[in-house]
Amino acid sequence: MSSSMAAAVSSLRALPLHTLVPLVASALAFVVTVFRRLLRRQRPVYLLNYSCHLPDADRQCNLEVCEYFGLRSKRYTDETADFMRLIFRKSGLGQETFAPPFIFSGKFEKTLAFAIQEAEEGLFTVVSQLLAKSDVSPRDVSVLIVACSMFSPQPSLASMIVRRFKMRDDVKVYSFAGMGCSAGTVGIDMAARLLRVQRRPGYALVVVTENTSLNWYFGNNKHMLVTNCIFRVGSAAALVTDVPARRADAKYELMRTLRTHHGADDAAYNAAVQMEDEDGGVGVALTKDLVRVAGAGLRSHIATLAPYVLPVSELLRYVYRVAWAYSGGNPKAAAALVPDFQRAFEHMCIHSGGKAVIDTVAKLLGFAPAVVEPARATLHRFGNTSSSLVFYELAYFEAKRRVRAGDRLWMLAFGTGFKACSVVWRALRDSGPDADNPWNGCAHRYPAALPVPTPRRQNYQPQPTEQQQQQEEQKKH
């Protein structure tokens, strides 16, 4: 070995100076580049576990409960009641979703006390369950992220959790508000970024919920009544970590996140907005542009995401299809083409904010009914639980035992503003339902069979009654 080194050194010395200097400089540059890349290499981040809130059965809210509450509150006109009944029946919600506690109080008033009760029931339950099954002490949590769009009390919801679970003094606390249904995926993205900039590996607790108690709309504005019909109670908590020793216990590894914001467009900004009606009633108005804005935002979002997640073969196939459409003089068809994202992911937690949103995503991305089945099942069983929706969908996959080691999973959520956020996971092991999985006891009922539509006959004419036939005969005579 020493003779070889000596021969190499002698060979280098024999080189002319104008050749030796660039060679040494290139070697040093290569070493520095490799060293810098090793220093900049991001620590892998894992989803250790998560938990979803399942309220008590006495909080279930079906159509009968909604009609009873509307009639007893004496706040709605008959026309408004008929409109909400129609929206509920077309919404895709089932008869077992959960409503806030004030609906069952008999007082028909939304108060701060009911909002606090709703928040504590959801947040404290999911955090307790998650920490217990993850074998993590509250004092081990170094980052706490809490998201709730429509309720921001003083002290904050995050402070309520810190106080309840006696977390350490130096925990980094962040509270999200106004982020809409995308807050869950945004929270995961932020947790991963915060963990990677810390000197030491640690744990980040992401808690997401929505509070409907103070945001129930008592009025007659149809755009603002829709939220009463589709939004329901739900909370979730996720424990994210970059501790290398916990990889064996983790369920998923974070592969990529992407956030896009389309608020510069006025239509996107005003698609879903909190406002006052003509009588001063406060609520959230969902405009007719919401579905169109969601489609445009999704198209822009996937255009950014596609190069990072799709295989090269699918990218080349997509480029060929677009070029072929343009060469055929059909630019509209070329603009409507999208890559096949089913070649990038085995499972997709699509934002299930409403039946129309699911239909739009399925149509735009060319998904078969089986792909969007988990989203429809989640909407039917739990309603729109806002930022926690994607975790209820993930729990559905696990309840069905569909997740296998190595599978890639795509979480896609939309939020007011208008925002779109993607989180890509890779399963580290086969996953089954945990003891606190919210689908335990009901997953076997899904996919739910849709009612068969009544066939419409062309040129249908009702048959006249016997009395009408007699009257016609008398007219003839």
Image (spheres, rainbow, N blue to C red):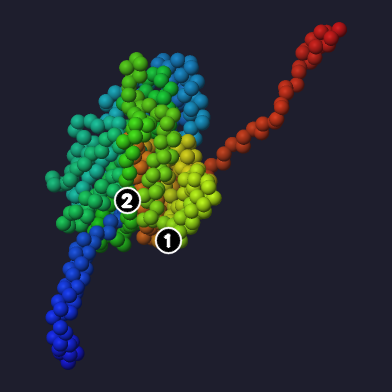
Find disc 2 in the rendering and name its residue.
257
Q: Nearer the viewer, residue 358 or 3?
A: 3
The furthest residue to the bottom? 3
Find disc 1 in the rendering and name its residue.
312
The furthest residue to the right? 477
- Number of marks in the image? 2
Q: What amino acid is at disc 1?
A: Val
Say whether residue 138 is left or right of residue 364. left
SS class of the residue under badge 2? strand
Q: Quadrant of the C terminus?
A: top right
SS class of the residue under badge 1? helix
Can residue 348 be seen by looking at this rendering? yes
Crowding around mark 2 (Cα neighbors within 10 Å: few <14, some 14 to 19, many 20+) is some
Residue 376, label in figure: none
For the point 22% across and 55% down, which residue is it?
196
For the point 32% across and 27% down, which residue is it?
274
